[in-house]
Image: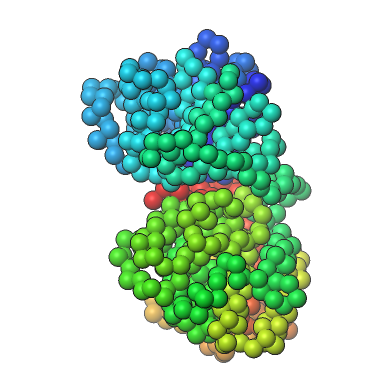
Amino acid sequence: MCGIFAYAGKKDCTDVIIKGLKSLEYRGYDSWGVALKTGTGITLEKNVGKVSQVESLESVNARVGIGHTRWATHGNVSVLNSHPHTDSSKRVYVVHNGIIENIAELKKYIPGDLFYSETDTEIIPKLIAHFMAEMDFPEAVKTVAALLKGNFAFVSIDRDSDYLIAARNGSPIVAAKSGGEFFISSDLQSLIAYTKKAFFINDGEMVIYQLDKQSLVFYDFIEKREVHKTAQSYDLQSGDIEKGNYKHFMLKEIFEQPVRLENTYLNYVDDFDIAFSEMLKPTIVQKINRIVIIACGTSWHAGLVSEYWLESLVNIPVEVEYASEFRYRNPVLTENTLIIAISQSGETADTIAGIKESRKFGIPILSICNVSGSTITRLSDATVFTKAGPEIGVASTKAFTTQLEVLFLLALYLAQQRGKLRHKDIINYLKNLKDIPEKIERVLSKTDQISTIMESHYAVTNALFLGRGVNYPIALEGALKLKEISYIHAEGYPAAEMKHGPIALIDRNMPTFFICIRDQSYEKVLSNIQEVKARDGIVIAVANDNDERITTLADHVIFIPETIVELSPFLTVIPLQMLAYYIADKRGCDIDKPRNLAKSVTVE
Ligand code: AGP
């Protein structure tokens, strides 16, 4: 995905746009560019590399401008392929986030036109300029937007007028107007400094702003009619998007987990009453006989953990699907199926597509999301929001644990509504859940121990993560955290599966991370640890406080407080997040913006 930021107003917009792009850099950081409309034309500046390395640009006294920070999809990382893109007469400039799928069809409108880049985006300004031979700039943009197929959000400016026009279909953009200034951005966070109200643009819609008249029009380019919108308030604070005293956003977000879990708990639980009836009506709850969870990456791991909770507490069959597979599999969904879509960003293209596939069956869709106003929340029948606050680090941490909390509360709510749990059982579970933040604090205090382990193993090239039961998904999550920020190859497996292949990998250079808590499989995991040690392997174990047996077997042990087994994932994941962070930091990796990754994958 990419970041788009645009401005029209009374100020010189050069620094405003650069600042906006810097706050969007988590969305992509291969290259960046700006197109600034001055009194004599449009100034274009594009570069490979991170916009955060730009101190400031020379002011050109521009009052209208567009900017882009890129995550390469079509075309490699180069200045030529970076945005903004323009037509051959250099009249129309465009920045774009998404993928245009009908390039060949569109090129028929401009036969013989030479393309200077490898991108799909370049077709947009060329087509707009083409149609401007017979219509004005806004009408040409409407025409082109209706012709595009695929996921897109683009913003366009014209050398000969003072319009700023954006259109979206599948990729996010928001607009905001404040005191004679107008902003368009890929996310809300970049607008906090300017306004606390924004216009949410839906798929198939455009926003047309003209600076001199300060006229603002919203237009549906599919239905070909104007639409009315009012600005919505949003509750982000500027402190949410600053690192403060932390070296990286990821470290800040790891340490924020206790307070974010408390906020999420307090948002939904009052005096042991779980307030989910608004999002999931009791009438629907009684009818459900199957749950299908769709998600990607870390959110998929949260879904896997919840499968254990939902099946054991609610006694409903649950399937957890990679959204990218689900959407093409022609799934068989019956009328009493509940779809749960889990997404931190609410913009993951595969999860969006999974929801759209599910909508064909007319069944209830509940999303669990961290970003209000995001696409997934607007495609779902209801959303339970995690109260993690903006998650800037590409590697998801606080969003994951707050997803777990919401999913556990959902399991308790469903169990209570369907008479599977008595109120006193609910109270007991909630009391244990309420204790989790303080227990996480105790794990977070073990940074010295984590650093010692890091010093011994930061240079490895491979690692294995093993867990059982409700901690098997945590083994997967630990592997994902390590690989995505330190670039060490890491795999997660059910511990019992080790004998069916991975044990062949064990040697003195391969650390194996075991989750070995006192649950029903404790003895079995101890045996697995012995099997690794018998082959000269290195064992790092996450175990319960005061477990003496594990210290006789493992090379390193990170102890975590006891809790009920169901809630152990909240605690076992913390040392794995911290280990991934400190190993990646020691390796000098770009932790908040790992190579090739983006915070939200808005392309398929
Ligand atoms: C997690 O650390 C990764 N950044 C990635 O797997 C992420 O969880 C995945 O892309 C899903 O994103 P979403 O939750 O915003 O849908």
- Measured as percent of width and height from the top left, residue 270 is found at 73, 72
Please give left or right for residue 80 compared with residue 456 in the image.
left
**353 lies above or below 554:** above
- Measured as percent of width and height from the top left, residue 476 is found at 50, 69
Looking at the image, can residue 585 be seen?
no
Q: Residue at x 39, y 26 (%)?
A: 139
- Measured as percent of width and height from the top left, residue 598 is found at 51, 48
Looking at the image, can residue 385 be seen?
yes
Please give left or right for residue 115 compared with residue 566 in the image.
left
Q: Residue at x 39, y 51 (%)?
A: 604
Of 350 and 253, nearer the camera is: 350
Q: Residue at x 25, y 27 (%)?
A: 109
Residue 520 in which image quadrant: bottom right
**188 lies above or below 271:** above
Q: Residue at x 70, y 61 (%)?
A: 260
Number of marks in the rendered image:
0
**480 lies above or below 553:** above
Please give left or right for residue 359 compared with residue 583 in the image.
left
**4 lies above or below 537:** above
Of 233 and 318, nearer the camera is: 233
- Measured as percent of width and height from the top left, residue 506 is found at 47, 73
Residue 486 in which image quadrant: bottom right
Of 381 and 108, nearer the camera is: 381
Colour scheme employed for the rendering of this structure = rainbow
